[in-house]
Amino acid sequence: MSCGSTGGAGCRSGGCGGSGGRTEGDLSRRAFLRDSAAMTVTTLAAGVTLHVFGAEPATARAPDEKVTAKVRWGLLIDVSRCADGCDQCVVACQQENGWRDTGHPETDAQWIRKLTVKNPRNGASFSLPMMCQHCAEPPCVDVCPTGASFKRADGIVLVDKHICIGCRYCMMACPYNARSFIHEPLEDQRPHAPRGKGTVESCTLCVHRVDEGRVPACVEACNDSAGGAMLFGDLNDPASEISRRVASYRTTRIRSDLGTDPGVHYRNI
Amino acid sequence: MAKVAYQKLEDHGSAYWGLLALNAIVLLAGLGAAWVMEHRGHIVTGMTNRIVWGTPHVFAVFLIVAASGALNIASISSVFGRSEYKPYARLSGLLAIALLIGGLAVLVLDLGRPDRLIVAMTTYNFKSIFAWNIFLYVGFLAIVAAYLFVMMDRRASRMSHIGSAVGGLAFAWRLILTTGTGSIFGWLVAREAYGAAIMAPLFIAASLLYGLAFTVLALAGLEQEKRRDLLSDEMTGKFRGLLAIFILAVLHLTAVHHLTNLYASERHGVERFLLLAGGSYTVAFWVGQILVGSMVPLAILALPRLGRSRTALIVASALCLAGGLAQMYVIIIGGQAFPLNLFPGMEVMSSFQDGQVAAYRASLPEVLLGLSGLSLAVLVAGIAVKLLPFLPRPTQ
């Protein structure tokens, strides 16, 4: 089967969100055969889908290769597989991007956080990761006075740390509280994730990994050592695993009523 | 009307120097606070990733809103042709500039990267109302400066059509500016306390109120120095009427805003928070804005005899400004404290205080920074009136 563009490691563990390893039985044999066919197609179509099940990336973007709007990266998160109390995605993001918990959650950066959502009427609850939703119509980009908040052609919403003046208007505008302001001097920064006191930052969808043909660290960790709830891929490619799942299942996008067209889809909410 | 003569502030007492010295000290303290914030980061403030705009923004927006309103008197004189306001037109323009400089200084010094001000001035995203506001602020300073020049230059002041044109432009610009300031909040669609078109007219009404109140206090202060009749009985009466109308305008728009929210079930939560259960925000709203900032001044101004006195006008103006600060506190900080509604109807918990009211306690550095904006405005206006003829010369 195709793993869309989820990480090889995650797929090896059978937790990439594909039919292998799933217990729900919601994919029929017919769907499995269709997936297998799609895998064959997508592995032959260089640049369309990055990963083969259990293999290294098929293509990575060359440094001088222009980012294209033909691709729209996104996530599909199966909430039924996201265990309450599990924070593997958060830990992986911290390690990958160099932010950490200093015991002051109100001022610490939180690129990704776990939410517990409970229905007050019956007590039923679920857990999910919340991060930048990489909206197609991002309010943070609209309001940024200098254009430091921007959306890449492939849908990844980023902050240009060179022209962020630290006004925090993007944080006022973000419907998801997904952005953090750096309140203190920083140490031990990762070369691929530059950060700076006095500027705003948020989930980059591990853009440095994506450009190398890899999946975001949270997705890899979830599939490696947690419930395999996260699927990364190209929402514009109808043959990708994520697109087919989004087309097949009832998924939810948080605050979709705002018309921001988030790139993060949730399932089983 | 007879030609108005103007003069510098010359025969002042030592209290003038005392006022300047006091404000210079507060300004230095504010600059020191900004230096600490710049070097140690915003960790020294009470601001967090949930309350991203704090006390400095309360002062900054308050001063910026007041700045556009301070131009009222000049506008009434040149745009609406009320010659009795003309003697105060220069001072009105000066206060507008001074208050805007004070507000902008706080806003800039609170930036995470104030050293990148040049970036903010040269790199624009024109879809951002914030970027538009940068143009509006700078344009306002330039237009009011031109307006003052036209009023004060011997030759230009003789050409009344130029004065009317520049005055008209300044009036239009100040309305657009305050519309822009209100829209900074009005266009935040995801936050239930904001996201309403009424924020623009509400801010315009607030600007009229704060601006007039500052003007009255400035005249009262200068009168104390000059020991002359800057606030005549006639003008006290006019200012009294205007102040009451502006208080009622702010009250009306505030009521409409809250009533509209109360009509929509989805906004009951935020209204309950702000009006009933918001702790300091609820107190600031009812006691600060409504009681101290509106009802008491209205009652004072309505008193049969005492209400017509200068003392009543001055006290009412001071209370209106206190209420204005409370109003900005509730709008800016209270509006952020109420949690975003990520999952309507559900309870949400996280390490980010999702679903909970965000805690906020102002720290000394940010209070000093905020106060220093006010002090900067006082210093700019106080020094300017001594250097240039902004004050009307009493008719003997």
Image (tube, coloured by chain):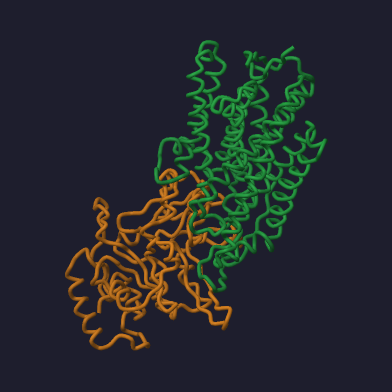
Chain colours: A orange, B green
Taking depth in this image into account, of A265 and A109 the one nearest to the observer is A265
Where is residue A181? Give x, y as percent. 52, 53
Taking depth in this image into account, of B303 and B55 the one nearest to the observer is B303
Across the whole image, how many numbered discs are drawn on residues? 0
Taking depth in this image into account, of A126 and B133 the one nearest to the observer is B133
- Most distant residue in the right direction: B305
Where is residue B181? Give x, y as percent. 53, 43
Taking depth in this image into account, of B235 and B220 the one nearest to the observer is B235
Q: Is residue B211 above or below residue B153?
A: below
Q: Where is the N terminus of chain A found, in terms of image quarters?
A: bottom left
A5 relative position to A259: left or right: left
Q: Where is the C terminus of chain A found, in terms of image quarters?
A: bottom left
Q: Is residue A237 above or below residue A157?
A: below
Q: Is residue B12 above or below residue B74?
A: above
Q: Is residue B382 above or below residue B393?
A: below
Where is residue A192? Give x, y as percent. 39, 55
- In the rendered image, is residue B28 in sight? no
Image quadrant in which you'd find residue B96:
top right
Where is residue A39? Give x, y as percent. 22, 76
